[in-house]
Image: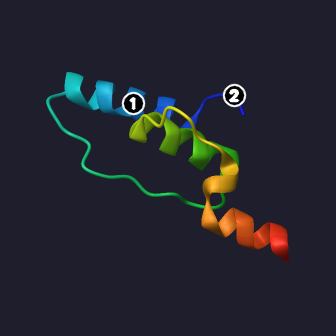
Amino acid sequence: EKTAVYQAFEMVKMEAKRYGVNVVGSEVIGTVPMKSLLDAAEYYLQIEVFNVDQILEKRLLDVQ
């Protein structure tokens, strides 16, 4: 991972703002590493103490 998803998204928003437009959404094409999505969630939700085991789907996958 060279650039975090949230960092790339924030850069796109800054560039769009320079041109007087707003970014109103995004989409994922293909697959994304779970860590990238977790990092984005932690950044945007400003979670102070976060553990991957708090994610229900991750816990369910670990049980299987």
Residues 14 and 51: in front is: 51
Identify the amino acid type marked 2: Lys
Quarter of the image holding residue 21?
top left
**Quick one: label 1, few (<14), some, or many (20+) residues within 10 Å?**
few
Is residue 38 or residue 18 the one in the foreground?
38
Vertical arrangement, residue 58 with respect to residue 47, above or below: below
Label total for image? 2
- The image shows residue 13 at horizontal and vertical percentages of 31, 32
- Compared across the picture, whether 57 is left or right of 29 comes to right
Which residue appears at 58% of the width and 48% of the height? 37
Residue farthest toward the right in the current orientation of the protein:
64
Q: Is residue 10 left or right of residue 7?
A: left
- Disc 2 crowd rating (10 Å Cα; few below 14, some 14-19, many 20+) is few
Residue closer to the observer: 21 or 3? 3
Q: Quadrant of residue 1?
A: top right
Q: Is residue 32 shown to the viewer in this render?
A: no
Location of residue 9 (image quadrant) = top left
> In the image, what residue occupies the spot 50% across and 32% down?
48
Q: Quadrant of the C terminus?
A: bottom right
* Residue hosting label 2: 2
- Nearer-N-terminus badge (1/2): 2
In percent of width and height, residue 11 lies at 41, 27
Q: Three-letter amino acid code at disc 1?
A: Glu
Q: Residue at x 22, y 22 (%)?
A: 18
Q: Secondary structure at mark 2?
A: loop
> In this figure, which residue is indicated by the disc labeled 1?
10
Q: Position of residue 60 (x, y in %)?
A: 73, 72
Q: Is residue 47 above or below residue 33?
A: above
- Numbered badge on residue 48: none
Instruction: Say whether residue 58 is visible.
Output: yes
- Spatial CA span between label 1 and label 2: 15 Å
